[in-house]
Image: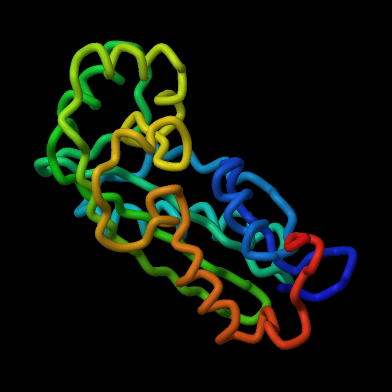
Amino acid sequence: MQNSNKDPIIILASQSPRREYLLKQAGLKFSIIPSDVDEDLIPVTIPSDYVKILAEAKARGISGKYPDKWVIGADTIVLINGEILGKPDSVDDARSMLNSLSGKVHHVYTGFAIFCMNKKHFYSEFVKTDVLFKKLSQEEIEWYIHTREPFDKAGAYAIQGLGTFIVKNITGSYTNVVGLPVCEVIEHLIKEKVININEDVDSENYK
């Protein structure tokens, strides 16, 4: 999907390789310009609002610099027993997160925002997915931690990676757990005629 211009009209305001991968798999052509929003300055509210506010801040910052582009901002959090889990900052932190998620259902919230300043278009939404972990042994937790995969991942796991063995069941969007609810993002871009599925399929991604 997307037009054939050399200069894409879509910008992903994220340095997440997982979000980049998801949009490429969907056939979009886009530029990547990571947002420099300091997430620590954003006050924590209820999860659905919090991820939307973060996504909006990221999209707004880049959209202000590139007002003619369609900018996608996103943020993902994991919620368990009312506690928000971000990215672990140590081995002990990762161990604690995995123990808290073991054998339980947790919730993954991703907020996404799609902004275009010149068109005065400011849209944001969130998607929630419920994820059930298997009961993890301490040996499994220690092995997984030492693969290094849990780091730089909200909730200390990657459903699309080695962490797939941890996940027993999901209810809702799989791509939302990876980091971006692709169905909802593409649906909105089609609605706003940013992409045209009848003309703009990027066949290079489907060989």
Q: Position of residue 114 (x, y in %)?
A: 54, 68
Looking at the image, which residue is at 71% across and 73% down? 1
Residue 151 as seen in the image, left or right of residue 199: left
Q: Is residue 53 visible?
A: no
Quarter of the view holding residue 194 = bottom right
Residue at image location 80% in from the left, 76% down from the top: 3
Of residue 194 and residue 187, the one placed in the foreground of this image is: 187
Residue at the far right in the pictured view? 6
Tell me: residue 5, above or below residue 43: below
Q: Residue furthest left?
A: 81
Residue 47 sits above or below residue 41 on the image: below
Residue at 44%, 30% in the rendered image: 162
Quadrant including the C terminus: bottom right
Quarter of the image for residue 10 reads: bottom right
* Total residue callouts: 0
177 or 57: nearer the eye?
177
Q: Is residue 191 left or right of residue 160?
A: right
Query: Residue at coordinates 52% horizontally, 52% vertically from top-left?
Result: 58
Depth check, front residue: 204 or 36: 204
In terms of depth relative to the viewer, which is nearer, 119 or 198? 198
Residue 131: image x %, image y %?
24, 48
The colour scheme of the drawn protein is: rainbow
The percent coordinates of residue 127 (x first, y second) are: 33, 63
Q: Is residue 49 left or right of residue 7?
A: left
Residue 17 visible in the shown view: yes
10 with respect to 176 (left or right):
right
How far across and down, in percent of the image, does residue 89 sit?
37, 19
